[in-house]
Amino acid sequence: MSEERYNFELVPLASVVDFENLVSDFDCDNDGINDFLKNDCPKYDLERRLATFLLVDKANSCLAGFYSTNIGMLTLEVKDEDDMPIEEQHNYLNLAYLAVDRGYQGRGIGTAIIKEIFKSVLVVAYYVGIEMVFLQSLDESVNFYKKVGFQLVEGPSPEEYQANGNSTDNMKFDMFIRIDDLYKKGYLPYENNFISNSIDINRGSK
């Protein structure tokens, strides 16, 4: 059995010349995500509300997948040493969207994108104080994110809701993975993002 190989290029949305043509046939089997990509994503990227990267199949000049991220803050209620409730705030990189075109699903492409996200996250964490990657998963994607290291923040899993006769079709599940856990799993940041910069300061004469 021959090995299936692809030649992809991961590019920022802002660098794409003919965005509308590239995304016109994209379909990840979720109408809401498809609509966001085609109609809202360019505006959000331009306004810097999200940063979006596109995974382009160079051989076929078509879009295989994409993801969008931004920075957020998670507030959790915990107990202090006197067992009194207090609020903790945690900075995170938010994985707002991740989707793979239906024609490319089931081939490990989603996992490959996640690994690239982890590398870039570690660069961000080097320069900015963030503790974790956070996302809100659809019910059918929870197990995928668990396989790549995410865990549920709190509360029942989709299976537990469903076992009690509750539909999870319109629910989202908070999940996270800590930056420290990425290092423990062997992920390393993109090395070419770390450079030594010389800084010259001219104070002028008195």
Image (cartoon, helix red, strand yellow):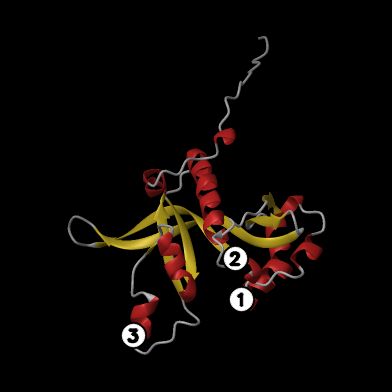
Please identify the residue farthest to the bottom as the structure is shown: 165
Residue pointed to by mark 3: 163
Give the number of callouts.
3
Distance of label 3 from label 1 (alpha carbons): 24 Å
Q: Earlier in the sequence, mark 2 or mark 1?
A: 1
Q: Earlier in the sequence, mark 3 or mark 1?
A: 1
Return the mark for residue 99: 2
Query: Dividing the picture into quarters, in which one does residue 186 lie?
Result: top left
- Residue drawn at x 65%, y 69% is 103
Residue 141 left/right relative to 32? left
Name the quadrant of the C terminus: top right
Residue 164 left/right relative to 129? left
Q: Residues within 10 Å of mark 1 (few under 14, many from 20)?
A: few
Of residues 197 and 158, the one drawn nearer to the viewer in this rendering: 158
Confirm or deny contact between disc 2 and disc 1 (CB under 8 A).
Answer: yes
- Examine the rendering and report whether any part of residue 71 can be seen: no
Expressed as whole percent of the image width and height from the top left, the position of residue 88 reads: 35, 56
Return the mark for residue 30: 1
Q: Does residue 3 lie above or below 187 as drawn?
A: below
Residue 26 left/right relative to 95? right
Q: Give the structural element (helix, strand or loop) at label 3.
A: helix
Q: Give the structural element (helix, strand or loop) at label 1.
A: loop
- Examine the rendering and report whether any part of residue 161 can be seen: yes
